[in-house]
Amino acid sequence: MRILVTGGAGFIGSHLVDELLRKGYEVFIVDNLSTGKKENINSKANFYKSDIRKPNLGKIFAEVKPDYVFHFAAQIDVRKSVSNPLFDAENNISGTINLLERCKEFKVKKVIFASSGGVIYGKKRDLPAIEDMVPNPFSPYGISKLCCEYYMKYYSLWHGMNCTSLRFSNVYGPRQNPYGEAGVVAIFIRNILNGERPSIFGDGEQIRDYILVNDAVSASISCIEKGDNEIFNIGTGVPTSVNRLFKILKSNLNFEGEPEYKPKRPGELYKNYLNCEKAKKEIDFKPQVSLEYGIRYTIEWFKKEKW
Ligand SMILES: NC(=O)c1ccc[n+]([C@@H]2O[C@H](COP(=O)([O-])OP(=O)(O)OC[C@H]3O[C@@H](n4cnc5c(N)ncnc54)[C@H](O)[C@@H]3O)[C@@H](O)[C@H]2O)c1
């Protein structure tokens, strides 16, 4: 079985590629290396350094003839989407349409899209957020993710394609960029390993739903056989405050210091976590690890990588 992964040099995409190869699939990657890294690319995968917006995507599809496509390439920085919404829309919306057109043309059996349960539901919702809530994104990044879900639905309804979207919560783990705006686990680990005090914006009681990348990857792979034309929340369903996250990191890294509390960031979502019952029922998704275990595993990787 031939599988194309867009964004396969990135954080989640590269773990997905590793696991697909381990399971015996033939894997092809399209990535422009804008945030992805060459060292993340599994040497057993076939790599095309290319952009999903480019017309040559058709040529790649003609060569690869993928059975399944995992669409994980995106610009993922909420702040960049605010400062340059056009850049965000070109990468995330136009890029997705270009990809879905090629999937239609080459009769791909299923497209699995990395959406976001962190940005689609918006503020003042009943929690945990559930898939059939009316979405209310308030950043260009959130709008672009939701827009892609609608395009997935359009291709499924009008062109008979099989398109499933996964609304990931906050994914963390090895290879996450510790210099980005998002990815608080990676940022805090880098801070502490460098002897710096992590910054917490606001009172630290912001709630998020942290899922280890390996669990996010298993949920994605389950969708090859299950969950046709659906939308699933993929998280742990466990609310965790930033203060608690800091405490877990502090004890595992034997850090003596305290975080530096800074004014809260305007527009930041205060609380969000996901109801993942639908994925449990329909794709047998069950997160395998606790936050404490996942954090220790992630710390070990960052120590080895000497960030
Ligand atoms: N990390 C999270 O917590 C999280 C949560 C929800 C959803 N997601 C989604 O999961 C996917 C992967 O996120 P990630 O955290 O691994 O980010 P990442 O930045 O590490 O990976 C994105 C990859 O896409 C590539 N890329 C970007 N634009 C491209 C383009 N136009 N053409 C080709 N390649 C392009 C980048 O080089 C990178 O390798 C994204 O779609 C993101 O929106 C991530």
Image: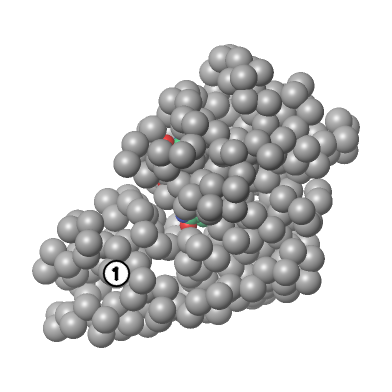
As drawn, is 267 to the left or to the right of 189? Answer: right
**Front-most of 114 and 286?**
286
Residue 151 visible in the shown view = no
Image quadrant in which you'd find residue 272: bottom right
User: If the image is split into quadrants, where does the N terminus sit?
Assistant: top right
Q: From the Cβ of disc 1, is ligand 1 less than 8 Å away?
A: no
Residue 168 in percent (x, y) is at 58, 59
Image quadrant in which you'd find residue 198: bottom left
Residue 196 in percent (x, y) is at 14, 67
- Seen in the picture, residue 240 relative to 10 is either above or below; the reply is below
User: If the image is split into quadrants, where does the C terminus sit?
Assistant: bottom left
Residue furthest out toward the left: 195
Residue furthest out toward the front: 24
Crowding at label 1, few (<14), some or many (≥20) Cα neighbours within 10 Å? many
Residue 73 in percent (x, y) is at 52, 38
Which residue is depicted at the point 59% across and 39% down? 26
**Front-most of 130 and 33?**
33
Which residue is depicted at the point 46% across and 39% down? 44
The residue tagged with tag 1: helix, strand or loop?
A: helix
Give the colour scheme of this rendering.
Answer: one colour
**Front-most of 73 and 182?**
73
As drawn, is 233 to the left or to the right of 238? Answer: right
Residue type at tag 1: Ile
- Seen in the picture, residue 18 relative to 52 is either above or below; the reply is below
Residue 10 in percent (x, y) is at 43, 44
Residue named by callout 1: 299
- Seen in the picture, residue 206 relative to 181 is either above or below; the reply is below
Which residue is depicted at the point 50% across and 63% down? 214
Residue 106 visible in the shown view = yes
**Front-most of 98 and 119?**
98
Image quadrant in which you'd find residue 204: bottom left
Which residue is depicted at the point 61% across and 44% down? 25
